[in-house]
Amino acid sequence: MKRALIASMVLVCTATPAALAQAGNEKPRTSWGVPDFGGFWTNTSLTAMQRPPGAENLVMTAEEAEQLTHRNVYSAAEREEAGASKVDQESSDKLLSDKNASRAYNRFWMDPGSSYAQVKGEYRSSWITRPADGRLPYSEAGIRANTRTNAFDGYEIRPLAERCLMSFTGGAGPVLNNGMYNNTYQIVQSPDSIMMLTEMIHDVRVIPIVKSKAEAKHGPGEIPRWGGDSVGWYEGDTLVVETVNSHPKQRSYISSTGKVTERYTRWSPTEIFYEFTVEDPVLYSSSWGGEMSLRASEEPLYEYACH
């Protein structure tokens, strides 16, 4: 009996976090039999789409993640503003002034998370897993397009986010993303569609569900859609969403001729495993993709209330 107990303890202690997650409680399902993705979810974390300087690998140890957290721009801003109370009034005012170009809003208003994300139980330095360097593989044309996008010089070409029409981060996707705050999602399912509402601004995607990839049909390319033209279907317990025809005025990772394939899998009762692949030879020299975890949120969505 004693030996059996010790053996059981060893097995539990040596099991990987991913294995423990998969071996957890039965994952919830809808009344019509598919995985239940409904509820409030968040990807709040310091992990961003691309790998930051100083991070050599995709997967990090807890110690490496802590070191990268210390060097993160949000952590630095928090230390700077905390230090403002310990210096003379003039220096403190300069640190917290709106004229201080090294920060945006006061750190009080930011909610980017306090650590790097774990995906399948592993600390990740970036959402991108392909290519191996964790960076966007822009083509020469993609670099030029990105430069033009950021060279705003007239009111007619200012970004939609400036008027709070679409998300600053493109958080609703495709591809899902995160930013300095408002990283919560609400998902509502029905047998023939799924809705994803983003806390950032108010972006929403309503995705029709068909029986299989063979039945997936997109609308005419002459009519671009906000968030792209998405169609979804289930492959076993994974929801697959294919998106094309992204609106040219929307901040997006694809051009109007690119394609994003997303895969949503209920990893545990409190986690959705999210995968994505981007194919767009107009902007990139190769296809690229990555992984993300959406964690169950104890908080609902809050109104962004942007002007």
Image (spheres, rainbow, N blue to C red):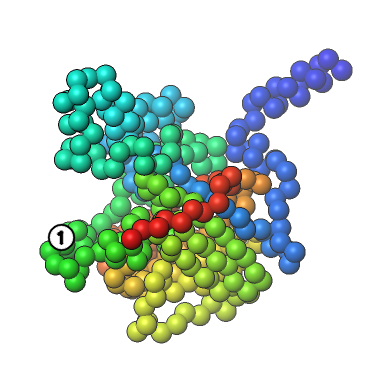
Residue at image position (44%, 74%) is 229
Q: Nearer the viewer, residue 212 or 92?
A: 92
Q: Residues within 10 Å of mark 1 (few under 14, many from 20)?
A: few
Q: Quadrant of residue 81?
A: top left
Outermost top residue: 2
Q: Nearer the viewer, residue 107 or 209?
A: 107
Residue at image position (28%, 23%) is 85
Residue at image position (27%, 61%) is 162
User: Where does the image place residue 125, in percent across and percent down from the top left?
Assistant: 39, 38
User: Would you say residue 226 is visible in this rendering?
Assistant: yes
Q: Nearer the viewer, residue 71 or 162?
A: 162
Asked if residue 217 is positioned above or below residue 161 in the image, the reply reads below
106 sits left or right of 46 in the view = left
User: Where does the image place residue 14, in percent across and percent down from the top left?
Assistant: 64, 26
| Quadrant, the C terminus | bottom left
User: Where does the image place residue 199, in percent across and percent down from the top left?
Assistant: 46, 56
Q: Which residue is mark 1?
A: 151
Asked if residue 66 is positioned above or below residue 110 in the image, the reply reads above
Residue at image position (76%, 18%) is 6
Q: Which amino acid lies under the numbered mark 1 shown in the image of this protein?
A: Ala
Asked if residue 144 is positioned above or below residue 77 in the image, the reply reads below
User: Where does the image place residue 231, in percent across and percent down from the top left?
Assistant: 52, 72
Q: Quadrant of residue 54?
A: top left
| Quadrant, the N terminus | top right
Q: How many marks?
A: 1
Outermost front residue: 89
Helix, strand or loop at mark 1: loop
38 sits left or right of 112 in the view = right
